[in-house]
Amino acid sequence: MKKTCRSFPINTPIILLLIFNIVVLASCDENYYPKPKGYLRIDLPKKEYVRFDTTFPYSFEYPVYAKITPDKNEDAEPYWINMEFPRFKGRVYLSYKKVDNDLNRFIEDSRKLAMKHIPKASAIEQKTYINTDAKVYGLTYIISGPDAASPFQFYLTDSTSNFLRGALYFNTVPNNDSLAPVINFIEEDIQHLIESFRWKK
């Protein structure tokens, strides 16, 4: 019995498409790498300051994009206020004490409160501040580390009668790597507060 070969019609468009795909795939020699995790871009407002000057025993300049509110905690004392940054969910707590031969205790309390962050901090940098003309002396604590709850704390005193402590917190889960631009931005505002700070009594 004679064998016959059956021929099949060639579908030219399909063949051409297959050849095109092979050429394209062969020309792609770049390896794919997943992109690193990124953070949202944060638009920061322009720096501009106004003076907080009331019947309080102190005054200072604060940014126009912040607002001053009274401290409403149960243990709040006279002249305790907060500097709120609603846009960034940040707050600087400012607590005032009248000094009566107990300055060392206030300074030590401030140190202990800053050092409580050691377990979560990668570093705590201390900087002395001295303004002899205005009789404003103090110390700042820059607290580094992605999980540190408070990245910046400070205290100011005239060394005889007045004492003020400040601490920056955010109403978010600590992730200071993503908050770094905001932290640096607000730290500049706190430094301005310190440099413009004046006692009134």
Image: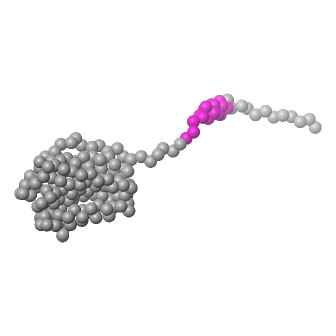
State the image coordinates of residue 61 (x, y, percent, origin top left): 15, 48
In this orientation, does residue 3 appear? yes
Q: Please tell me which residue is depicted at 35% across the width and 53% down the height of the picture.
A: 144
Which image quarter holds the N terminus?
top right
State the image coordinates of residue 114 (x, y, percent, origin top left): 29, 61
Left or right of 51? Residue 30 is right
Determine whether 69 is above or below 7 in the image. Answer: below
Hey, which residue is sitting farthest bottom in the picture? 74
| Residue 16 among those drawn in magenta | yes
Left or right of 109? Residue 122 is right
State the image coordinates of residue 189 (x, y, percent, origin top left): 22, 48
Determine whether 201 is above or below 45 in the image. Answer: below
State the image coordinates of residue 159 (x, y, percent, origin top left): 15, 58
Nearer to the camera, 61 or 29: 61
The part of the image, by quadrant, that contains residue 15 is: top right
SS majority, magenta: helix
Q: Please tell me which residue is depicted at 24% across the width and 46% down the height of the picture.
A: 188
* Residues rendered magenta in the picture: 13-32
The part of the image, by quadrant, that contains residue 155 is: bottom left
Hey, which residue is sitting farthest right in the picture? 1
In this orientation, does residue 152 appear? no
Nearer to the camera, 152 or 30: 152
Q: Please tell me which residue is depicted at 20% across the width and 59% down the height of the picture.
A: 165
